[in-house]
Image (cartoon, helix red, strand yellow):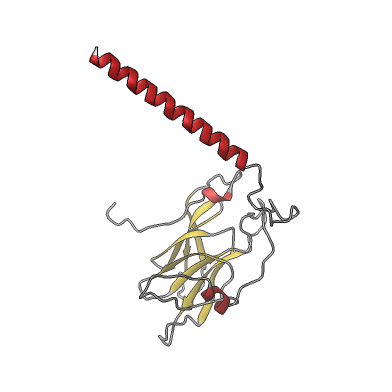
Amino acid sequence: MFLCNKALLCICVYLLASSLNAFAADTVRSDRLTPAEPSTPQELFGQTIRASNFRTPVEELAGFHVPEGFQVELIAAEPTITKPMNMAFDAVGKLWLTQSTQYPFPAKEGEKGTDAVVVLEDKNKDGSFETSRVFADGLNIPIGLLPYGDGVLCFSIPNILFLRDTDQDGVCDKREVVLGPFDTSRDTHGMVNSLRMGTDG
């Protein structure tokens, strides 16, 4: 008898909780009749890309909020770099960047991409990467890069490439497809990225 009463009590509590949740959900739904962004003009809402100008380093710095004891230091800015997406340091301290002005719309099949992998270098060791060179251009939304050997592993739609500098002049002169092609026809956000060295196999 005790077990039956206990089970009945549990059922009643469950039904009461379900009713309260349903009431709360109805209340929230009624509140959602008010637009979430009432200040956004209708002609701007839903745009894929909104036009925006580069912000100055000073303007960007004003938007950072970091924990006590931390500080933000500028190492590179436009026009030295343009729309950077990924970065990785190599063994000698050079900074490799993927930059994409095409994102999020890839170059159409048969068309040459307009994006690049660039290498920044701080030759005078003052903390500012004042030297910039294009290592490989004509890429298609390059993302996920890993400096390796005489070049860099990088994904550029639709393949993972090994971009090599075989004559050591600082510019890619050989491109090898490592893996691919990958299907990005439905969305360019599902691309290969965050490449990591895995020498342990």
Q: In this view, does 156 lie above or below 134?
A: above
Identify the residue at the far top of this view: 1
Identify the residue at the far left of this view: 2
Q: How many badges with numbers are in the image?
A: 0
Q: Is residue 96 above or below residue 185?
A: below
Q: Where is residue 64 in the image (x, y as percent from the top left)?
A: 49, 71
User: Which image quadrant for residue 81?
Assistant: bottom right
Q: Position of residue 59 (x, y in %)?
A: 57, 76
* Identity of the residue drawn at 69% across and 63% down: 51
Q: Where is residue 54 in the image (x, y as percent from the top left)?
A: 63, 72
Q: Position of residue 197 (x, y in %)?
A: 35, 59
- Of residues 63 and 153, the one drawn nearer to the viewer in this rendering: 63
- Left or right: residue 182 versus residue 1 is right
* Identity of the residue drawn at 61% across and 45% down: 185
* Identity of the residue drawn at 51% across and 30% down: 22
Q: In this view, does 80 lie above or below 125?
A: above
* Identity of the residue drawn at 48% across and 28% down: 19
Image quarter of the N terminus: top left
Identify the residue at the far right of this view: 43
